Amino acid sequence: MQETGNISDQRKERFIQLPKIIDDRGNLSFIEENFHIPFKIARTYWIYDVPGGEIRGSHAFREQEEFIVALSGSFDLVLNDGKETRRYSLNRSYMGVYVPRMTWRTMENFSTNSLCLVLSSMPYDPSDYIWDYDSFIKELKSKTILSVRQQTDISPLLSAYNSPVTTVYNCNVFELPKEHNRAGNLTALNNGVEVPFDVKRIYYTYDIPSGATRGGHAHRGLCQYLIAASSSFDVLLDDGCNKKLIHLDRPNFALQIVPGIWRELLNFSSGAICMVLASEKYDESDYIRDYQDFLSFKSCKL
Ligand code: T46
């Protein structure tokens, strides 16, 4: 695993470079909570199908912190702390911007096919928004700004996953919420609500050459939501007895993979991005990378 150092105390607005793991199957980057970013993830959302020329997200959050990445295409993030404005051009899947609370932020100049990923420190809370710039300045000047709220510990709903015997029939595709308006589409998942576990890590594969396959392993304890954030690919699931082929081709559908399932990812179309919301941080000892070992693992559970 590549490490970028412990940054838990750094709550300053800035670019953060993410690990980028390059091999001949494409590139992979990942983001772990309280490590690459200085907060615990409570919500993950992504914005897509933004028509050219649209402006999104002119507001500030009283308490929410965010980390924003252009997974595909490009856009500008314009940040204002009440004193000055800074423009960040986002156009690399392995570079993101940390946005502290009480920052006025706007997104603009979206390119065709842009895909914006946002990790947020809080569940959706309309009362956390400041929609008007003058009120934002007033709140900044007053001393009434709340301190950073402790994350609510939402108990992960993992009972279904702890079953020792899992099959491909425990892996299903879910339609996710999609907020549509004139400025594009947004899909948001709150930990423990729309996703039945706490997302501790997000990773995504991109720049995948045609004909490449990925995966070819199982996890002992990891739960995942796989999303075709852009374009499409197939996932072949295998529990040692049964196989199931799933085609993913929409950013508002997720394939839930429970532990103990062998998976292969194939048939990536051009520009495909496989985004994964994971219940645990990266741990190589959780992988079973040899198929015979996987079959032994499954037979031990019977
Ligand atoms: C999965 C499929 C869908 C890290 O250091 N941190 C990470 O968070 C990840 C995901 C990977 N890595 C390292 C481990 C390897 O040295 O990145 C390298 C490539 O990983 P891997 O060969 O496992 O990549 P894929 O695309 O075959 O599998 C990935 C996930 O690892 C796996 O959990 O289910 O995507």
Image (tube, rainbow, N blue to C red):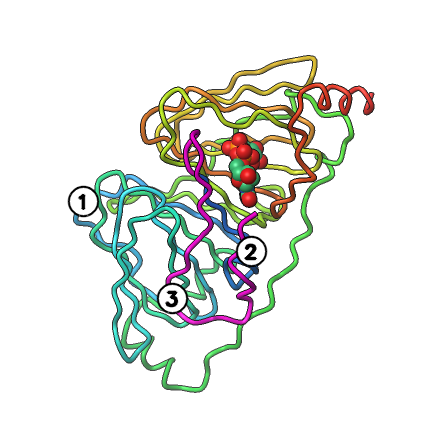
Query: Which label's residue is closer to the chain start, 1 or 3?
Result: 3
Eye-nearest disc, 1 or 2 = 2
The residue shown at (64%, 21%) is 168
Majority secondary structure of magenta residues: loop
| Badge 3 element | strand
The residue shown at (43%, 58%) is 67
| Badge 2 element | loop
Which residues lie in the magenta part?
1-27
- Amino acid residing under circle 1: Gly
- Amino acid residing under circle 2: Glu
Q: Is residue 125 left or right of residue 244?
A: left
Eye-nearest disc, 1 or 3 = 3
Q: Is 104 one of the magenta-colored residues?
A: no
Query: Which label's residue is closer to the chain start, 2 or 3?
Result: 3
- For disc 3, does the CB lie below 8 Å from ligand 1? no
Q: Is residue 283 left or right of residue 30?
A: right
- Amino acid residing under circle 3: Arg
For label 3, the residue is: 14
For label 2, the residue is: 33
Indicate which disc residue 52 carries: 1
Q: Position of residue 154 (x, y in %)?
A: 65, 54
Indicate which disc residue 119 carries: none
Q: Marks 2 and 3, how far apart in space?
A: 16 Å
Q: Position of residue 155 (x, y in %)?
A: 69, 51
Disc 1 to disc 2: CB gap under 8 Å: no
How many neighbours does mark 2 have within 10 angstroms: few (below 14), some (14-19), or many (20 or more)? many
How many neighbours does mark 1 have within 10 angstroms: few (below 14), some (14-19), or many (20 or more)? some
Q: Is residue 157 left or right of residue 13?
A: right
